[in-house]
Image (cartoon, rainbow, N blue to C red):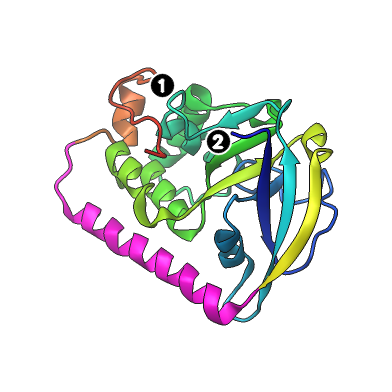
Amino acid sequence: MDKRITIYHGSNHVIKVPVFGEGKRNNDFGMGFYCTESNDLAKEWAVSSLRDGFSNRYTLDVEYLNILNLNSPEYSILNWIAVLVEHRLFSIKSPVARRAKQYLIDHFGVNVNAFDLIVGYRADDSYFDYAEAFINNGITVGQLARAMRLGKLGEQIVVKSQFAFSKIRYEGFETADKSTYYVFRKARNDEANKMYQEILDEEEDGLYIQDIIRGGIGNDDPRIPRNISE
């Protein structure tokens, strides 16, 4: 990552000064300022079917930031899931899912609050559904890893610490037209879901979360897919 990067935040309003400590605690990686390096993706995230939005542009000096990249080979797909289940509100449909949530946090959890900046996939509707299916023992870890690559649904950059917030510089904004960018967003999501159904229709003899729990499988097991950005 370059020492100075350009990031974009999609929103329904212009944000000239991002404020540390604001935001929802139940976002993917907890409280933080959620951005992307893609202006087009920020515009997709900014709109709804009913309203336009804004892509706010910033520069961020990352030279002295402690960065957690959950898409690097150092981490597995289950590190991302563990962080997600710790922060997002999931539908826990079975005793297996309750055990799965705690097992993932205990064995694959990462303390995101120890970092200034986090890079990882964004759990929009499709990705969230895939993660939920996995912890409810509906798909294998292999199917999950394949699903995470579908439709190029987007990688996000999350500014976490007060120090990192001090390194943000506002550069301006662009309007995101719902008639254009909501169509792009829906098409991306629909394509991912179509491909996901094709994965589900294939025979799979892999590890379900219940197998992982019963086997006491940890992060160093070669059967756990790594580097979900590949």
Answer with left or right where residue 14 lies relative to residue 28. right
Answer with left or right where residue 18 lies relative to residue 121. right
Residue underneath mark 1: 219
Residue 6 on image: x %, y %: 67, 48
User: In the rendered view of the protein, which quadrant contains the C terminus?
Assistant: top left
What's the mark number on residue 83? 2
Q: Indicate whether 152 appears above or below 216.
A: below
Residue 121 on image: x %, y %: 50, 45
Which residue appears at 45% of the width and 55% of the height?
Answer: 153
Q: Indicate whether 197 appears above or below 62.
A: below
Which residue appears at 55% of the width and 32% of the height?
Answer: 69
Q: Mark 2 and mark 1: span between their CA atoms?
A: 14 Å
Foreground of the two, 81 or 6: 6
Q: Indicate whether 70 appears above or below 191.
A: above
Mark yes or no: residue 69 visible: yes
Main SS of the magenta part reads helix
Which residue appears at 73% of the width and 46% of the height?
Answer: 59
Count of number-bearing discs: 2
Q: Secondary structure at mark 1?
A: loop
Mark yes or no: residue 137 visible: no
What's the mark number on residue 68? none
Residue type, mark 1 in image: Asn
Which residue appears at 38% of the width and 47% of the height?
Answer: 148
Magenta span contains residue 179: yes
Residue 139 on image: x %, y %: 30, 45
Residue type, mark 2 in image: Val
User: In the rendered view of the protein, which quadrant contains the N terminus?
Assistant: top right
Q: Residues within 10 Å of mark 2 (few under 14, many from 20)?
A: many
Foreground of the two, 55 or 97: 55
Magenta span = 176-205
Q: Earlier in the sequence, mark 2 or mark 1?
A: 2
